[in-house]
């Protein structure tokens, strides 16, 4: 079996600890590093030497004092290490003949007040050899300059005289006068009332083209033609057999108008506010629109402009109320010759109040409700009146006088407890909740 013997490592200490390992420098041989005692002695020797006087002038001042021809050797460089000074040692006083150096923070006003530095005598008295023999330089132009020539003044020409203008004549507008009368001496067209002629706006309203107000607006804009000729004069008259057409712009404007159906609650008036009661139009806002509205029309603020009720509904009544911007629908529902039916459900009580109202109303009174009553001295149109149950009547009218149903029931001894309108023409109230509204669909018509 082999054994391994490890020999301990020994290092011999140097005999003299002051002798250190040599330090190699760059580009020189081996030199010995000084000891602490030698470095302190060298520093003391340097401090004992007198301080060298430092120049106080600017470095570039010597170039002005030295002659240009002198070629002296450049000054030796200052030692890399300046001798140390005693504490609080100051520099020697400046030469009073030299002005102090300018500070970079000195303003131009302060610099103008300081005295100008005297030029060195060596430079001021020394003439320049190159300029001594030169003649004085006189600035002469390279090319001869002639005096400026003024252009001759042109005589002012008078503007050509314009021929005298004739007084402007008013522009004649071609206005079609649709009423034809070839025997009239004033021409084939005129606006006077001819036998059988009608106002153009009234004829358009009768044909259902527009309301009278809309017709007057379209006539002023030139959107109405009679037998192919544009009519722009209000009050023009036409014959019933003449052909009336309207411009596409008028049709587009009319298509933008909307009609709103609202289930008016009790306590709201149909038209203008009165006696502290609000009009029903205040309910037409986005949060009150019926969520089952199938018209496809999006609510706009412009839809509230000129939105007027087409028909009345009393403050104590509820049911279907029509608000429209379309004059044709308004005329169709409330015109003088309107034949649109309006259906109501009326809850009544008899004069005695002991039993059902149906038992207290005689057959003659029921017949009078249907036809035979007068209001304000005018006979009422025939109506449909029938019992729905013991205390509820169904009315179908073709006219809408103020509080007509209530006054009819009072005439036969009945007291109205509640009134609800459920239909106007072919448009039904349906499931529209109280206080909500919807737009009239495109496929819905009243008559």
Image (cartoon, helix red, strand yellow):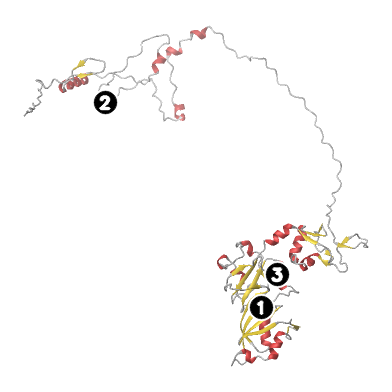
* Mark 1 nearby-residue class (10 Å; few <14, some 14–19, many ≥20): many
Q: Quadrant of the N terminus?
A: top left
The Cα–Cα distance between marks 2 and 3, rounded to whole angstroms, is 113 Å
Residue 133: x %, y % from top left: 53, 6
Residue 116: x %, y % from top left: 45, 22
> Which residue corresponds to mark 2?
89
- Mark positioned earlier in the residue sequence (2 or 3): 2
Place residue 361 in its image quadrant: bottom right
Task: In this rendered view, identify the residue nearer to me: 312 or 289.
Answer: 289
Place residue 229 in its image quadrant: bottom right
Residue 354: x %, y % from top left: 59, 93
> Which residue corresponds to mark 3?
330
Q: Indicate the secondary structure of the residue bearing disc 2.
A: loop
* Mark 2 nearby-residue class (10 Å; few <14, some 14–19, many ≥20): few
Residue 179: x %, y % from top left: 86, 63
- Mark positioned earlier in the residue sequence (2 or 1): 2
Q: Indicate the secondary structure of the residue bearing disc 3.
A: helix
In the image: residue 219, left or right of residue 11: right
The Cα–Cα distance between marks 2 and 1, rounded to whole angstroms, is 122 Å
Q: Indicate the secondary structure of the residue bearing disc 1.
A: strand
Q: Which mark is residue 343?
A: 1
Q: Residue at x 65, y 75 (%)?
A: 423
Say whether marks 3 and 1 touch (CB < 8 Å).
no
| Residue 279 seen in the current view | no
Q: Quadrant of the C terminus?
A: bottom right
In the image: residue 353, left or right of residue 155: left
Say whether marks 2 and 3 touch (CB < 8 Å).
no
Q: Which mark is residue 293?
A: none
Q: Nearer the viewer's eye, disc 3 or disc 1?
A: 1
| Residue 151 seen in the current view | yes
Q: Residue at x 60, y 90 (%)?
A: 356
């Amino acid at each position: 079996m082999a054994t391994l013997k490890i020999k301990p490592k020994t290092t011999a200490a140097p005999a003299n600890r002051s002798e250190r390992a040599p330090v190699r420098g760059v580009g020189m041989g081996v030199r010995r590093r000084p000891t602490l005692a030698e470095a302190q002695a060298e520093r003391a020797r340097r401090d004992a030497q007198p301080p060298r006087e430092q120049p106080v002038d600017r470095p570039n001042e010597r170039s002005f004092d030295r002659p240009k021809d002198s070629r002296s050797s450049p000054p030796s460089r200052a030692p890399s290490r300046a001798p140390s000074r005693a504490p609080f040692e100051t520099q020697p006083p400046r030469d009073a003949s030299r002005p102090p150096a300018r500070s970079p923070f000195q303003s131009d006003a302060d610099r103008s007040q300081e005295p100008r530095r005297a030029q060195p005598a060596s430079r001021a008295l020394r003439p320049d050899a190159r300029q001594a023999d030169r003649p004085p330089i006189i600035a002469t132009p390279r090319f001869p300059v002639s005096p400026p020539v003024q252009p001759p003044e042109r005589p002012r020409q008078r503007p050509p005289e314009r021929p005298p203008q004739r007084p402007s004549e008013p522009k004649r507008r071609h206005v079609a006068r649709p009423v034809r009368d070839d025997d009239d001496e004033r021409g084939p067209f005129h606006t006077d009332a001819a036998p059988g002629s009608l106002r153009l706006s009234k004829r358009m309203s009768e044909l259902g083209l527009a309301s009278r107000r809309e017709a007057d607006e379209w006539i002023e804009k030139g959107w109405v033609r009679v037998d192919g000729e544009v009519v722009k004069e209000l009050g023009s008259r036409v014959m019933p057999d003449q052909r009336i057409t309207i411009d596409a712009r008028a049709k587009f404007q009319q298509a933008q108008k909307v009609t709103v159906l609202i289930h008016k609650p009790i306590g709201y008036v149909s038209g203008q506010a009165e006696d502290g009661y609000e009009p029903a139009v205040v309910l037409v806002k986005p949060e009150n629109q019926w969520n089952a509205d199938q018209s496809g029309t999006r609510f706009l603020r412009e839809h509230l402009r000129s939105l007027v009720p087409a028909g009345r509904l009393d403050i104590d009544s509820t049911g279907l109320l029509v608000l429209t911007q379309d004059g044709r629908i308004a005329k169709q529902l409330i015109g003088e010759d309107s034949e649109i039916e309006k259906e109501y459900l009326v809850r009544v009580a008899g004069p005695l109040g002991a039993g059902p109202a149906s038992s207290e109303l005689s057959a003659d009174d029921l017949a009078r409700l249907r036809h035979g009553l007068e209001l304000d001295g005018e006979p009422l149109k025939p109506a449909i009146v029938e019992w729905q149950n013991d205390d509820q009547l169904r009315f179908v009218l073709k006219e809408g006088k103020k509080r007509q149903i209530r006054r009819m029931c009072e005439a036969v001894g009945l007291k109205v407890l509640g009134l609800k309108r459920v239909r106007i023409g072919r448009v039904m109230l349906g499931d529209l909740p109280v206080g909500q509204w919807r737009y009239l669909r495109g496929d819905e018509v009243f008559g």
